[in-house]
């Protein structure tokens, strides 16, 4: 939140939440989806998406190793 706000608020939590709100406003201004469910309407498709993502070249530079089950957990939380 501090980076997007350009300052810190009274607490780390307040700073984080304000940063999230600012990002939401920015995404809305660009008409960009905020939630994964706005892009993937059927949650059952997440498993296949995560399996396909395992072959994405971006994983080579990811700082942490991940498997499709872990990706699915993240996607379900984002959905």
Image: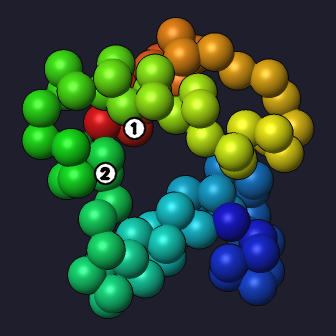
Instruction: Give the quarter of the image for residue 33.
Output: bottom left
Inter-mark Cα distance, 2 to 1: 6 Å
Give the percent coordinates (x, y) of residue 72. Answer: 45, 20
Judged from the image, the secondary structure of the residue bearing numbered disc 1 is helix
- Identify residue for label 2: 35
Residue 71 point in image, percent of width and height = 54, 24
- Is residue 74 visible in the rendered image? The answer is no
Above or below for 29 versus 11: below
Residue under the image location 12 percent in, 41 percent down: 41
Please name the residue that numbered disc 1 is placed on. 78
Foreground pick, 17 / 78: 78
Along the viewing direction, whichever of 29 and 1 lies nearer the viewer = 29
The residue drawn where x is 73% and y is 38% is 59
Circle 2 — which element? loop
Judge whether residue 43 can be spotted in this image.
yes
Contact, CB < 8 Å: mark 2 with mark 1?
A: yes
Counting from the top left corner in percent of width and height, residue 42 is at 12, 32
Along the polypeptide, which appears first: circle 2 or circle 1? 2
């Amino acid at each position: 939140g501090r980076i997007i706000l350009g300052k810190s608020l009274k607490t780390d939590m307040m700073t984080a939440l304000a940063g999230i709100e600012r990002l939401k406003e920015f995404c809305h201004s660009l008409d960009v989806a905020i939630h994964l469910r706005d892009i993937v309407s059927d949650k059952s498709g997440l498993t296949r998406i995560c399996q396909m993502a395992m072959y994405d070249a971006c994983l080579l530079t990811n700082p942490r190793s991940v498997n499709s089950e872990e990706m699915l957990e993240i996607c379900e939380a984002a959905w």
